[in-house]
Image (cartoon, helix red, strand yellow):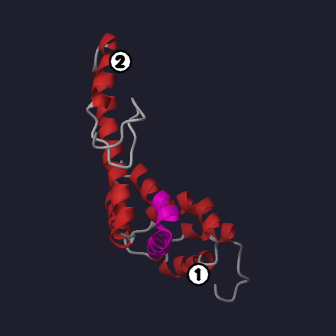
Amino acid sequence: MRHWETPQPEDALELLAFVDFRVQEYVVDILRGLSDSWLMVYLFFLIHAVKLSNFHDTPLSRFLVERAAQRPNYIGHYFFWFLVSEMHDETVSLRYALLMDTFLRCCGDAQRSSLLGQLRCASQLERIAKLVQGAPPARRRQLLQDELLDFDLPNEFQSPVNPTVQGNK
């Protein structure tokens, strides 16, 4: 592979279908040259490519955590939420949880706190949505309003019911 003409990143991505570590290292070497903006174009695909491996610790997974940690407010934010969005898939949930944990350990206290606060907020909203969905139709609106008023918002969030109310009431 080292003797090949270096492919464009979008062509190199096709090589990720091969789960060989040497092939992944070759692709990662090409991806290292991507700007943050271009990496963002491919980030969702790359996170899905992590599923193809038989191992948790791969050159691709290390590269993704590394780049996410370098720019935690940009790449890291999307990296985290792309992982969260796929946690329902039991075939990769452990792998993605390990990637998420590794990223959260090196992204910095402020970013970690922000992302975990967002995750708690999203989990609470999901709980409220399920509660409202299971209620009789005539009761849903009032139940939603009551639940949102009792909603424990992080300090940096505003109430969806009353934007003048900041987190932690």
Please name whichever residue, 88 or 147, is drawn nearer the observer in this view of the structure. 147
Label 1, residues with CA under 10 Å away: few <14, some 14-19, many ≥20: some
Query: At 64% from the left edge and 84% from the top edge, which residue is drawn?
Result: 1
How many numbered marks are there? 2
Image depth: mark 2 or mark 1 in front: 2
Query: At 47% from the left edge and 77% from the top edge, which residue is drawn?
Result: 59
Q: Quadrant of the C terminus?
A: top left
User: Where does residue 21 sit, x and y in percent of width and height?
Assistant: 48, 79
Disc 1 element: helix
Please name whichever residue, 108 or 3, is drawn nearer the observer in this view of the structure. 108
The residue labelled by disc 2 is 141
| C-alpha span from label 2 to label 1 | 53 Å
Instruction: Report whether residue 49 is seen.
Output: no
Q: Quadrant of residue 61?
A: bottom left
Question: 87 above or below 148?
Answer: below
Asked if the stretch drawn in magenta spans residue 78, the answer is yes
For badge 2, the amino acid type reads Arg
Label 2, residues with CA under 10 Å away: few <14, some 14-19, many ≥20: few
Disc on res. 29: 1
Q: Main secondary structure of the magenta part?
A: helix
Please name whichever residue, 62 or 48, is drawn nearer the observer in this view of the structure. 62
- Stretch in magenta: 60-79
Point out the residue furthest to the right here.
Answer: 5
User: Where does residue 41 sit, x and y in percent of width and height?
Assistant: 62, 60
Q: Earlier in the sequence, mark 2 or mark 1?
A: 1
Query: At 38% from the left edge and 49% from the top edge, which residue is drawn?
Result: 156
Question: 72 above or below 152?
Answer: below
Q: Quadrant of residue 18?
A: bottom right
